Image (spheres, rainbow, N blue to C red):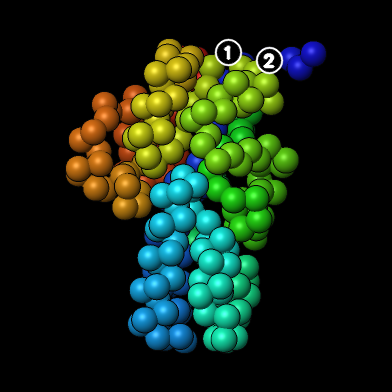
Amino acid sequence: MTTPHDTVFLFDIDNTLLDNDRVQADMSTHIGVTYGQEARERFWAIFEQLRAEIGYADYLGALERYRLEAMHHPRLLRLANWLVDYPFQERVYPGALDVVRRAQLVGTTAVLSDGDAVFQPRKVEKSGIWPVFGDNVLIYVHKELELADVENHFPARHYVLVDDKLRILDAVKRIWGERVTTVFPRQGHYATDPNEVAKYPPADITIERIGDLLDHDLAPLAKR
């Protein structure tokens, strides 16, 4: 039987530890410059359609769909190479990994992310984030629906969840209640959209940047 941890810190990836908005902006620029505005607009239209269907961002899946439409546009195949070779390590937020290492002094740390089974793990590995967490990496389709599995992997008296989406923080808070402390870094388009933010109650702790947690004593979070 797995021995319960005292506290487990759960960190999201996109726009929490890593500036995914910047990745998307770079990708959009690359598609437009290399393949043209029409290709860029069509790719993002397919991407959003696929995300609405499956509930998470699937860049390679969108490219596969686009390929079926543009079978006779072989240059598009190189977009996959651009994606998997992207320098994700340059998009990790300043201080983000220092925050993780600080949390490791007072508890166990794990990645808790949504995403596909190919590109998202690649992003976590190539960014240099995976090695910092060891093998404590969980990637689901809808992570807020997988809390029982999270508890199975990392049983704990208390959890600290750091995520840029208030929707996720609220959903987890409704299930775990006082067993979780929610931390909301105001980074990325979801966190700075006033209409999106207004839909949910505030997190237990709100910070402007992930690096701001370096100015917090994390030990009290582990004792809440």
Nearest the eye: 65 or 168: 65
Q: Identify residue for label 2.
A: 4
Q: From what the image shows, is residue 221 above or below residue 167? A: above
Q: CA distance from mark 1 to mark 2?
A: 7 Å
Residue 222 in view in this figure: yes
Element marked by disc 2:
loop
- Please tell me which of labels 1 and 2 falls first in the chain: 2
Q: From what the image shows, is residue 204 above or below residue 65? A: above
Where residue 207 sits: x, y (%)? 33, 38
What is the quadrant of the N terminus in the image?
A: top right
Q: Identify residue for label 1.
A: 157
* Left or right of 91, for residue 123: right
The image quadrant of residue 165 is top left
The image quadrant of residue 125 is bottom right
Nearest the eye: 188 or 143: 143
Residue located 40% across and 73% down the image: 42
> What's under tag 2, amino acid-wise?
Pro
What is the quadrant of the C terminus in the image?
A: top left
Element marked by disc 1:
strand
